[in-house]
Every structure is written in structure tokens, then in C-alpha cells.
Image (cartoon, coloured by chain):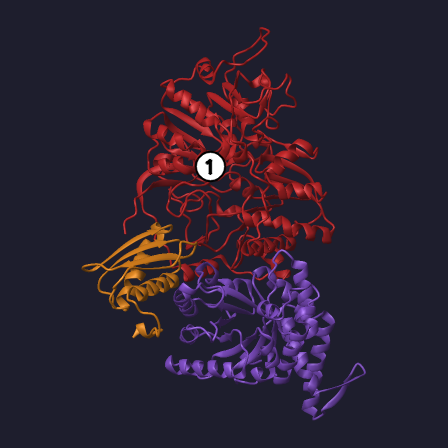
Amino acid sequence: MEVVKTAIAGTLESSDVQITIEPNGNGTAVDISSIVLNQYGRQIKAIVLDTLNTLGVKSAKVTVVDKGALDCTIKARTECAVYRAAGFAESFPWGGEKQ
Amino acid sequence: MTEKRRLRRTMMFLNAQRPGLIKDAYIYRPDSVMFDLEDAVAENQKDAARFSLYHALLNVDYCGVERIVRINGLDTPYWKEDIRASVAGGADGIRIPKCEYAQDVKLVDAAIEAAENEFSRVKGSTLLMSAIESPRGVLNALSICEASERLFGVAISGADFRKCMQTAYTKSGVEMAAARGNILLAARSAGVQCFDTVFTNLDDMEGFTEEVVMNKQMGFDGKSVISPRQIKIVHDVFAPSEKEIREAEKIVRTVRENADKGVGVFTIDGKMLDIAFVPGAERTLALARASGLYEGEF
Amino acid sequence: MKNAIGREIPDELLVNAEPYKGNYALDGVEYTKPGPTVRASIKPQESKIAGSLRDAIVQCGLKDGMTVSFHHHLRDGDYVINLVMKEIEALGIRDLTIAASSVGTAHDPVAKMIEDGVVTGLQTSGIRGRMGEAVSNGKLRTTAILRSHGGRVRAIEQGEVHIDIAFIGAPTSDEYGNARGTGGKSDCGVLSYAMVDAKYADKVVIVTDTLMDFPNFPPSIEAVDVDYVVVVDSIGEPKKIASQAARMSQDPRDLMMAENCVRVMAATPYFKDGYSFQAGAGGPSLAVYRFLEPLMIERKIKMRWAIGGITQPTVDLLNKGLIQCVVDAQDFDIGAVRSVHENPNHYEISTSQYANPMNKGAFVNKLDFVILAALEIDTDFNVNVVTGSDGILRGAPGGHPDASAGAKCTIIVTPLVRGRIPTVCERVVTVTTPGDSVDVLVTDYGIAVNPARQDLIEALSAHKIPLSTIDALKDKAYSMVGRPDDLEFFDRIVAIVEARDGTILDIVRQIKPYEL
């Protein structure tokens, strides 16, 4: 999936995470700030990269502002941001990204 | 008791867009949660709410609490995608808002079936309920209740209904009396469950309790709730008394014993009883068990 | 070597100290109390008022390397520490040790003095804000010592800490130094934390903003112990000293946990007429009062005494006659401040009376129940209330270890997970209250009883209270949030956590900056 515009998903509420995805010339860069960085920073990074990879995102600039979100929320917000950034509005392949 | 007829004393609304709410609402032990994609979610966040919902359905263990999704209205561009996300995630049921005709139910039923095929879910595993929010919906209640095999119940929804009727909430409930009565009659005729509307004033727990007592007396199966603080009140009101539990247990036991002997009609404490009393007695025992008041064999 | 709760204590710390050996290991030990050096005032003298803080500091003879003490009854509104330390810094005095009952965000300016070497020692029962960051990042030139409230007065009364000058902020004082916690424009209710300082410091300076006619009676701090009185414009910001009356939490999670705490209490043999009780000031702990009240009325029982940091909910039950008396070592809100003024059954006590393990019997020893929060609790029931999930000091042992050790039934109430941080974990970062003094854990996901308390397990089971185990709760937490990475520290030890009896419970090392 190609990132064609800047998109944001998620909020700065407790237990949420805000993901901003912007087009990036070459490769993927992830910047993370989190209230649980010392204990979960690496796991947050892994789940974001894994989600991008599954969606076939080859290059993007990703900014993660985490307020203690669980993995399923990080995944949901990342997917939403990617689809928005790719200009994709409906008929999502729910679960299909696993294949 | 089948899934379709499980106990649903409380259905707690949760904004599907808010991770802090959906991550563990089951700890308050409502019988069902209602992930809301409709009114609670802003127009520009409908997609985000679906992603949240989908991943919560897949990943959060709700520990036996039923997971229903309130989709967007059939007059919006959202409801079909809502159904796909819900079915893909494995929701237990779908709630149709603003239902007015049996045709509305059939439309959603078909979309669910298509989604069940698309996402390899067991056909018929996604249940359905209708929210009736208008005078026309109230008048069409019976045909709505009979429109789908999936449909387990109907709920009256007060906010829109009162607006349509040019009235407002009263403590006595007189403004809703006809609507409540009518959908109860329809639900009972069709053999499906019936749920009362939310009570929105969280500062008036006394008024809430009175309304729940009235709901129980009218014959509702349960009530939609908007806060965990309302759950225990509903469960306490719906809990059967010690005496009711003992009688129900006696009925079920006597019917089983007599059935073994081939006897169909018998007396308990001087009252003539038959097999028709069993479903009511079983429901009493199920309520008692859910309230932690009964640990017996039936 | 490893201490009794399995924490590795480096040998170099054990030259002059013992490792923790268990809650009551030092019971019956005998010791001689030290006395302060006192300058007699035989000649008649009208007033002890010094011209300024600076004058008082100079006249007390403060020198490099000395120890100065402060209390924290003025909480986040405190101006006194900053006022005094500013003058000390201006005088060019260095290498001081601050012995405070607690320091917090109000004292952020002192963090710079730690970096500059004006302050090189710190002993406290609580540490937050910039000072916590400075200590955690290794800026303090010696190792900080963290003690419980009871442990702090014990250290003073046993002579482990010698206070050269005690600076005691007081809402009111007369010109001779009779000082009270009540009245004035910076009312904090009581002066419990300062009482022992006044008895054991060589020099005592009262800092007040409201001078009363002599004698200002009955005094919390007696003039016989006071050298100088300094009048300043203001000793604190009233709004931050005593907050508006604590409003009972409406958060359904807090309420659910509070209700379960009361179910646990009611299932124990201690819940009977005449029982005693302490609750922390956190949301779920305070909400316990809401469920206690109807149950006490239903069972027709009264609480003989409540103790602790006092808040409005305690006062409400006192006024309703459901609590017979309140013994008060700190006031958290206006309701508590007002009550200690007005209610004859609401008494001020010293922190030694409250919790010192080495006197002849403190109030906490007679507690039936205490309900407290935790930042973390591990599967051995050890509690951490001082280091955050980022390894930075940001909390207070306070009275937590004291009340826990004393009470017959210690209940920790905490959500299983905060944000993404599992509260119930394999191993807490820092032990501040040892697991052998914790009896029951109440979370939003279930209740666990310390296996050492089989009697409580039986009592709760008999009342059909569903019980989990602390391991199962930990597993549940980790299944939701994932196992947290271990924090990474340098070798440098930045703080020692003393058990209340003065043995070493745990150590805190300097946190490493996190790299992804």
C-alpha cells in the first residue's frame, strides 16, 4: 500500500495512541514517544513495523505518540492511519491482511 | 438455554472509538456490551472506530460477556462496512438502529449472511436485534420481531421516540406507556426478548431504580445501560426472591419426576401445574444463578 | 548478600547497617536515646523573634556539612524549604544534608542546589518532581536515604540522624515559639511531623506568617524547645496546602474495588464494634468509606478510632457518630483541617505516636485495618510506592510500611493495570513495603490473599468471596499488556530504602537513558 498523503488516526486520551503517517522518500522511519517507553518501547516499535509490513507499506514517516495503548489499539490506529494515508475509504480486507 | 435466549438483563453501551472503554468493560459483568459505531462516534471517525472494534473483537477476551455492535443507520453510507467489520471480528450480534419495517431487518440479515460467507463464519452465528425508535416502528413491531431467524429481541429507544411524539421524559413513564406496552406484546407474540431504553441521568439513581422496577413488572427482559454504576441495580431488581427460587426449583424437580412416570398434570402446594410452567421456572433459576443466589442442580 | 525478601544488598552498605530480617525481627531491642545540645535561656527575655531568616540562620551557627530538617504539612503549597534554602545558598554554605519528612514538586528549585553541591545529602519519606529526577540521575553526591514516616522519627530518636537546625513552618506562633498547626492564613491543621524534630534538634527555628498573642496554646511545638521565631510574609499557598474537600470518586472501577474491600473487611473477624481503621488518600481507598457507612449502620457497629492522613470522608463519619475518635498525623483537605479545630474528638498526635517502631508502642500497632494503594505489587506481595515505571523516584513510602506492618489486616487496593503498566508484576522495581506485612490484594480483576494468611483465606471463602491467586492476577495482567521489559540501571546506587526498623530493605540504582 502506498502512502500518498499525510494522515492521522487515534487520540491523545489515556490508553490510546496517535499515529501520524506521512509520505517518505525512501524507507520507513518510526519516531516513538510513550509514557511507557522504558518498559514497552521496543514492543510498540515492533507492532507498528509489523503492521506496516503486513499492509505492504514500503516507505513512510511514522510518528507514534503513545498514551499507554494495548497492542490491539496500536494495530487498529496504525491500520486506520495507513488506509487513510493511502486514500482507501471502504471495503477493507478485514482479516485479509493476514494472508 | 440457547445463545438466542440467553439472559440479557443489562446491555452496556460503549463508544467503540475509545480504547480506554472497550479494553476491559467486561469486568463490570454486564450480560452484554454494545459497541457503538453510531451516535457516539463522530462522522469523520467512523473508519477509526471500525478498526478499534475489529481488533478489540479479535483480541480482547470478554470472558463470556456477549458482544453486540450497534451499526450505523440504514440511511447512512456506513452500515454495510460496519457489518463486515463486526462479522469479520466475530461479534455475537448486530443491533439495527431506527428500525421501522420488517424489510430493514431482512436487508441487514442478508448483509450479515454475505459477510459470514466472506469471512468464513458459521452461517447464522451472528445474531440480530432491532431498536425501535419511532411511532411507525412501534406499530410495525410484530412484523419486525418475526422478520429474521437471527433476531433475538427488540429494544425500545426513548430519545428519538419521545421527540417524534412531541413529549419528554416523565418519572411515571406515561409518555412511553403505549410504546413499551406495544413492543412487549409484539416481542412476546413472536417469542423474542424485549429491552427497555436507557436512563440517562446518572445523578438520579433512585429514579433509575424505580424505572427498572417498572420494567421488570411490565415484563421486560432487561435494560440498556450507559454506566457500570447502573449494572448492579438492574441485576438486583431482576434477582428473584428466595421464595420464588424455592418454588421454581420445586416446579422443575416435580415436572422431571412426573415426566419419568408419564404424568403431565400435577399439584404443588395445592396449585394445579403442568409443563407450561417450566420455562418460567427455568428462567427464574437462571436469573437466580446469574445473581449468585442459586447453586442448585437445575 | 540477600536480605529476607531476596533483595541483593551490596556488602559495602552493610558495614554500618543490617539487611532486612523480617518485620518484627528487632522486637525487644534496647537502646539509649541521644539528646540535643541546648543553649539555656535563663535570663528573662521578651521575644525570640529574629530580624530575618538570614539572621536566624547565622545566629544558629549553620556551617558547611550540617543537617537541616523540614516537615511537609504544607504539602505542595510549601514555601518554607525554598525560602530557607535560598538564604543558605546566598550565605555560601555548602554540603548540607536535608532531612525532610517529604519533598515534592514545590521544591523543584532545590534540584539545582543538589547539582551545585549546596545540598549533598537527602533523607526523606517522599520525593517527587525535579528532586526525584536529580537523585535518580545520580546528581546527589551521597546516597539518599528513604524512610517511612515511622522510620524517620525512629532514626531521629535513635540518633542515626542528628538534626543541627530544624526549620519548622508553622501557621501560627507567638513571639516565644509556641507554634500551632491550626489558625492563621496558611492553616494545615496539625504539626505532627515536626514534633520529634523540635525535641531532638540542637537548634529550632519557627517560621510563621501569623503571630499570635502569647501564649499560643495549646501548642503543637512548645516554646521550651524553640530558639528563634522568624516572621515571613507567607509560609505557603493555602489552596495547595489543604485542597478542597476530597470528593468521593465516581469512577466505576474505583467504586467496584472499594466495594470489594469492604466485602473483604466484613468477612474478617476484625470487623466488629470498636474496630480501628486507616485508609490512604487515593480514589479507591477513600471510596471505601462510602460502602462502610451503610454496612456499619446495618450491623449496628461503630469504629472506635480512625488514624492517618485525614480527609473529609473520615470527618463525615466522625460527625455522624459512626467513628468515635480520630487521631490525626496529617490533614489532606479543608474538611480535615476544620475538624481538628472544632471537633473535640479529633486529636493531633506526633509521628512517633503514630508509627515509630522503636518506641514503646505506636498507634499503628493497634490497627485492625489499613487500606492502601500501590504503584506496583509483586507475586511475593512486596509493594513499591516510590519508583515509577520509568525507574525515576516519584513517590513516598510515607506511612505505608508502618500501617501495613501494624495492622491485623492490610489490604492493598489497585487496578490490575494502569495505562499499559501492569500493577501486579513478577518483581517490583523497588520494595518499599515488604510482602510479609501485606495480607490482601483487591484489584478490578479479582482478589488475592497472601498465602501466609490461611486464616483470612478461610474467612473470605466462608463468606463466598471469590478468590484468585496473585500469580493468576499477574498472568492476567501480562496477558493483556505483554510482559514489560526490565528497566536498565547503572551500577551507581542513588538511594537506600530503609525498612522502618532501620535495616536495609532495598536499593535504588541510577536509571540508564532508554534507547529504542
Residue type (three-letter) at the residue carrying disc 1:
Gly
Compared with residue B237, is residue C497 higher up or lower down, i.e. above or below? above
The chain whose colour is red is C
Q: Which sits in the foreground, C186 or B265?
A: C186
Compared with residue A66, is residue C159 higher up or lower down, i.e. above or below? above
Compared with residue C33, is residue B65 higher up or lower down, i.e. above or below? below
Left or right of A63? Residue C467 is right
Left or right of A75? Residue C267 is right
Chain at numbered mark 1: C
Query: Where's residue B254, x and y in %?
Result: 71, 84
The answer to whether residue B207 shows anywhere in this view is yes
Residue farthest toward the right in the current orientation of the protein: B270
Q: Which sits in the foreground, C451 or C149?
A: C149
Q: Which sits in the foreground, A33 or B108?
A: B108
Left or right of C239? Residue A6 is left
Query: Where's residue C451, x and y in %?
Result: 53, 55
Q: Secondary structure at mark 1?
A: loop
The chain whose colour is purple is B
How many callouts does the rendering have?
A: 1
Query: Where's residue C207, x and y in %?
Result: 52, 22
Residue farthest toward the top in the current orientation of the protein: C43
Q: Which sits in the foreground, C30 or C392?
A: C392
Compared with residue B239, is residue C291 higher up or lower down, i.e. above or below? above
